[in-house]
Image (spheres, coloured by chain):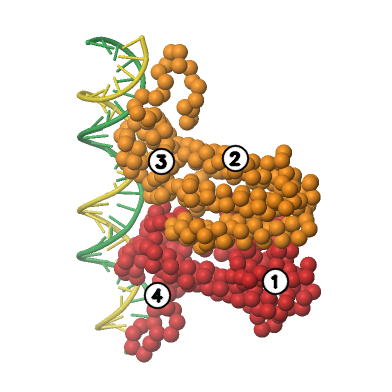
Chain colours: A red, B orange, C yellow, D green
Amino acid sequence: MTGTGSEGKTRTAPPRRGRVDKATAIVQAACEVFGRDGYSRASIDTIAAEAGASTRTIYNHFPGGKEELFRSIMQWSSERVRDEQLAQLRRYLDPERPPHPDDLERDLLALARAWVGLMTDFRNHFSLVRHIYAEAGHIPAEVLDAWQEAGPRVVGREVASAMAALGDRGLIDVHDSPAQAAVHFMALICTEITQRSYWGVSPLPPEEADRLTSAGVRAFLRAYGSSG
Amino acid sequence: MTGTGSEGKTRTAPPRRGRVDKATAIVQAACEVFGRDGYSRASIDTIAAEAGASTRTIYNHFPGGKEELFRSIMQWSSERVRDEQLAQLRRYLDPERPPHPDDLERDLLALARAWVGLMTDFRNHFSLVRHIYAEAGHIPAEVLDAWQEAGPRVVGREVASAMAALGDRGLIDVHDSPAQAAVHFMALICTEITQRSYWGVSPLPPEEADRLTSAGVRAFLRAYGSSG
DNA sequence: CAAAATATACAACGCTCGTTGTAATTTGGC
DNA sequence: GCCAAATTACAACGAGCGTTGTATATTTTG
């Protein structure tokens, strides 16, 4: 779909033609517009203008039209952010290198801060996610499921196994459910910020966001810390 | 706006003409359709059909057209659910009648269950809320603010003062911020259920929902309990 | 440069939708 | 049953949008 990778360059032309591949320009513009306006409000003309392409080119690349384009960027955007989230997770909470007990709070806080940072770095993506939430009843179940499996569910599983690793080493007490601990961690970190920032429409000042993040981490450690 | 209350019945005709007041039928239908389809996808014709009214009648009652209708039901639906949430809050966590320490978990769990029940009883409302989240960038700031003040913010403040009352009586430790404790309580209760139920599209079996709810309450008490 | 693949401009079709005007019809109060 | 208010049916306008076909232009490849 987004395969800018290693197709045969022996016979067929490589997909890079113009200054930047038109296909990726279209995908990026579609992410922007769909994220800002949602599926119904977004128009092909707007996406074409934002991409610096003509509407006809969009239909050449996505014969399925608006629906196929939306499905494609659901996957694309989700995978991109998932990779970024997993990278931060491994950076600050690598199961191979468990932290010192004294450094646990520091590492969890660093992870939380990094994730909150992603929410502003990829504002379009999370705006798109909100639209997916809202329009879930109008998206085919298979597409919704593929999207979850391409992003959120994977991240949830990885966080859960990181929690399990911390539990195995006695750094936290997962209370019989690493998956639940993972959900509670993410909920305590993100809920208040998304709420107070009007879901990204009017971002919080960084120090305020930091305060809320660290409060969430401390609450999590009170609920799931092994010693205190 | 929805004033079915006490207007003068001395001169002007009371607004109830047909079997049910057409205005309220329109408002209810609009809640249903806007909640299901969102602002852009919803059409006046659909709302009229659902209300058993003609489109012209809608424009007679709401001269501002689609936008005014949407603004009206934002307020109406929010106030309705807010009242219900506050009623449950006062029922299970009345600041005047603080619970016995032994009954705190029982009462918090009862409150949490009641709130989760509201999420299914008023599915349309919460679906509408998700659409508001997603379309926040296309809703005037004043309207968004009035909506928050008519519902979510009030509930948040009431929960916060309930938490403060519990803290004053030594039943919990609010850790310097009753408001934050309130947000964390609601986050721990609702996040996993909304997530796992595909945001209400495919509801969880009741016993599973109950399990997640009580796990959230226990986590909250570990984080904010005064003794343990 | 020539050929082939790709992108564009342009027009057009069909459909949906928000909105309004008007005349006819129904409804409820007296 | 009469009157006034409310509701309806109906037609129509205008705009926006998804989509397609076609002919032309542009870029890449050989």
Q: Which mark is residue A1?
A: 4
Identify residue for label 1: A173
Q: Position of residue A2 (x, y in %)?
A: 42, 75
Depth order, front residue of A126/A55 = A126
Type of amino acid under label 4: Met
Say what secondary structure mark 4 lies in.
loop
Foreground disc of the pair 4, 1: 1
Q: Earlier in the sequence, mark 2 or mark 3?
A: 3
In three-dimensional space, the C-alpha distance between marks 4 and 3, rounded to whole angstroms, equals 39 Å
Q: Position of residue D10 (x, y in %)?
A: 20, 34
Q: Which mark is residue B87?
A: 2
Type of amino acid under label 2: Ala
Q: Is B74 on the left or on the right of A49, as rendered?
A: right
Depicted A211 relative to depicted C4: above or below: above
Identify residue for label 3: B30
Type of amino acid under label 3: Ala
Type of amino acid under label 1: Asp
